[in-house]
Image (cartoon, rainbow, N blue to C red):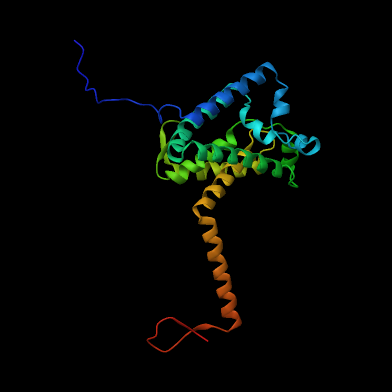
Amino acid sequence: MRPNVPSSVAFSLGPGPLTPAVRALVAANVVGYLLTLVVPSLSIWLGLVPALMVERGWLWQPITYMFLHGGLFHLLFNMLALWMFGVELERLWGTRFFVRYYFITGIGAAATTTLASFLPFGFADAIYGSVTVGASGAIYGLLLAYAMTYPNRPIYIYLVFPIPAKIFVIIIGAISFLSSVTDTGGGVAHATHLGGLVVGYLYLAGRRGQIGSTIRSQFLRWRMARLRKRFDVHNGGRSGDGNRWVH
């Protein structure tokens, strides 16, 4: 005899069904991956190669590189992360803002990679002539946005160890920074990952007014310090007046 299960009981895995923008991005990435299987040379044309952007003017690459991947597991991992973190953010932000943020962080990650290729360090030469592909820059931007939106929500490392989203992003940001300046041949675009994090933070913090308020606060402190020095202001005052500023 089959046990009675209340109709109100429901089971779900992950954030739920794909949202419109996430669905379209997944489809575009799958198509891009299949095209490179058929025509491998497309990775050179559509991937991110700073040397070709500078010397031949292939300025479409900061956009098209996001839809190519270096292997099946690379594609699956990025699309899984896009689903896990992108669906909830798109529901919260709306499709238009989500798409704008996704491309800003992806293109910003490409710009970071290109700028890194001009640095006077050994790793820059490898970046300048290599091909970078994948949605990882935009995915890291989504991770950053998720951590800023839900800082204490747990993310399970290896599906076992829970860690708050804000701590998780700090860890992967530190790893990306250290790897970008020490790893010269790992095949992982650490500068791109770091760029996605940094550009995502600057964009979201700028919209929230955090950057502007910080700059204004620092400017006012600088002005006050100059005025105190100029007019020889010092702590003092009569007893009982508390901590007053006098000339």
Q: Where 228 falls versus 210 (above or below)?
A: below
Quarter of the figure with residue 225: bottom right
Quadrant the N terminus occupies: top left
For the image shown, how many numbered marks are present on the structure?
Answer: 0
Q: Position of residue 52 (x, y in %)?
A: 77, 34
Query: Which quarter of the figure has residue 180?
Result: top right
Residues 155 and 216: in front is 216
Residue projecting furthest to the right: 55
Name the residue at 73% across, 22% down: 41
**Residue 130 versus residue 211: which sits nearer the camera?**
211
Q: Considering only vertical position in the picture, is 23 above or below 109?
A: above
Residue 100 horizontal/vertical position (percent): 56, 39
For the residue pair 157 and 233, the one nearer the viewer reads as: 233
- Residue drawn at point x = 41 percent, y = 35 percent: 161
Above/below status of 144 relative to 225 = above
Residue lying at the far top of the rendered structure: 1
- Residue farthest front in this picture: 96
The residue shown at (60%, 21%) is 31
Q: Quadrant of residue 240?
A: bottom left
What residue is rendered at 45% in x and 87% in y? 237
Q: Position of residue 119 (x, y in %)?
A: 73, 46
